[in-house]
Amino acid sequence: MKKINLDLPVANLVEEYPELKNILTDLGFTEIVNPTALSTVGKVVTLKKGSLIKNIDLGKIVKKLEDEGFEVLNSGINSNEEENILEENLSENKENNKEDRLELLKSYIQRLSQGQDLEEVRKDFVKNFKDVSSEEIMEAEQSLILGGVPLEKVQKLCDIHSALFHDQDIIDQSGKDLEKVPGHPLNILSLENKEIKNLVENIKNSQDKLPEIKKLLAINSHYGKKAGLIYPLLKTKYKINGPSDVMWGVDDEIRKSLSQIVKSKSYDEKDLEQVLNRVEEMIYKEENILFPILKDNFTEDEWNKIYADLSEYGLDLLGDIPIWKDYIEKEKIKNENSTSLNFETGSLTAKEAIQIFRTIDAELTFIDKDDIVRYYSEGENKIFPRPKSCLGRDVTSCHPPKVVPIVKNLLEDFKNKKRDRLVVCRKIKGRDILVKYLAIYDNGNYIGTLETVEDISEYK
C-alpha cells in the first residue's frame, strides 16, 4: 500500500505521487494546480497545516486518501499542535492572513469552551493579536456555530468569549460615529446602555437591592429594540447570524433571570453577581462588536425605519426619544377614502377597513403561505409590539432562536392539515392574554396563518 505522511510538505508528496494533484484539487486545494504556488508555498506547507489554512476537515482528507488506496501516517492533530501551526503561519504570512487569524481566533474561543483558564488563553491571544476587528469576532463565533458547536454552548460562554477581548484594541472599520449623533438609533441605544450601567452600579452599592433590581427590569425595553428591529434584519438581509443567534439568546436569559428574582423577591448573592456581570458583558459586546457591524452594514433608509419604530418597544430607560434631525417621515397612504374594497357581502373604503381593524379588541397578524409577515393591525398599548420593518420578512426571523423550531413545526402542521389552530392563554405583565394561531384555507389550499392576541383579564 502507498504510504503518505501528513507531516511532509505537499510538494514532496505530489512529487512522489503525481495522482495526488487531482485528489487534493477535488478536496479544495485548488492552488495546487499553480506550479508557482506548488514550488514555493507547497515546499513548506504540510497537509495538516494546509487543512487548517483552507478550513478543510482533516478527517475528510484522511478518508479520501484511504479510499484512493493510501495508508495515512500521522493523521492525528491535537489542539496545541493545531494552535502552533496557526501561530506559525500567522507570523510567516502577515500580509495575507485573514483565514489564519480567523482560525486562530476560533481556537482561543474553543479553548475557553473546553474550560481552560481565561488569563492563560488571553496571554496567548495578546501575543498574536495587537488588534482585532468586530467583524473577525463575529465571524469566529458564527463559524463555530456553522461548524457544529451547539448554539446553546456558544451562547452559554458568550460572556467569557467577550472577556477575552477586554483591554485589546477592537477596530471599528466603519469610520462612523453614529452613537454621537443626537437622536440616531445608535445614539439612543448608547444612552440606554449608560442608564443600564447606572442601574447596575446602584444595585451593587445598595443595601436593599430588590427595589433597585426591579428598576433594572426596564432593560426589557432595550433588549426588545434589538430583538424586534436589529437582530432579524442582520439575519435575513445580511446573513449575519452570530449576533442574532448568540446575543438574542443571552438577552432572553438575562431577562428571565432578573424577572425570577423580582417575582420570588429573593436571590442568591452569587447568582445576582453572575447576572449583573452578564448585563455588563452584553453592554461591552454591543458597543465593541454589534454596533460596528451595524454601522458597516445598515443603510440610511434602514436606520430611518428603525427610528420610526423605536417607540413600539417603550422608552422605560430614557423617558423620551431624542429628536433625530435627519429622520424623514414617510408619507401616509393617500386617498384612503377613494380606495374601495369590494366583497360578496358589501364594500368598505380602505379608511373604514383600517379603522375597523384598529377598533377590534384583538391584535391581528397575517403570515402568508410562504411564511412571510404581510400585515399587522395598528393600535396603541400593544401587548406584542410589531415594527413596520417586520413586513415582508420571514416570520421565523421575528422570534428568538429557541422558539424558531416550535414556530416551524406549527406552520408545517397547518400546511399538512394535521391541525388548523393553536390556542394558548399566557400570563404577560400580570394580564391574562389569549393567543390564537388560525390556519387559513381557500378551497382546501393553505394560504396563510392569522395570529390574534387579546387581553381577557377583565372577562375572567
Image (cartoon, helix red, strand yellow):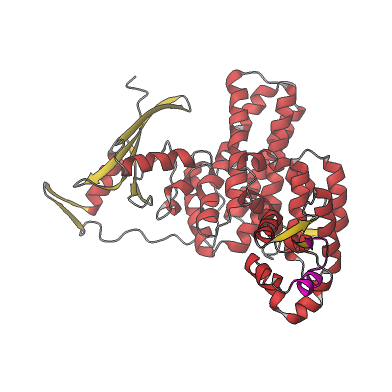
Quadrant of the drawing holding the N terminus: bottom right
Q: Please state which of residues 264 and 121 is positioned toward the viewer in this rendering.
A: 121
Where residue 163 sits: x, y (%)?
A: 77, 44
Residue positioned most to the front: 1
Vertical order, 311 against 30 (above or below) = above
In percent of width and height, residue 274 lies at 72, 31
Vertical order, 364 against 87 (above or below): above
What residue is at 50 percent from the left and 55 percent from the top?
236
Q: Is residue 121 magenta?
A: no
Q: Nearer the viewer, residue 388 or 452?
A: 452
Q: Horizontal placement of 100 versus 433: left or right?
A: right
Q: Residue furthest bottom?
A: 36
Residue 154 placed where, x, y %?
66, 43
User: In the image, is residue 360 above or below residue 427?
Assistant: below
Residue 181 seen in this snapshot: no
Q: Would you say residue 434 is visible in this rendering?
A: yes
Q: Is residue 216 left or right of residue 372?
A: right
Residue lying at the far left in this picture: please name it: 345
Q: Which residues are magenta?
A: 4-17
Instruction: State which quadrant residue 333 falls in.
Output: bottom left
**Quadrant of image for the C terminus:** top left
Which of the two residues, 21 or 414, is positioned nearer the viewer here?
21
Report the side of 151 relative to 80 (left or right).
left
* Marker count (numbered): 0
Q: What residue lies at 12% left-to-right and 48% top-to-bottom?
A: 346
Decide: is 294 above or below 421: below
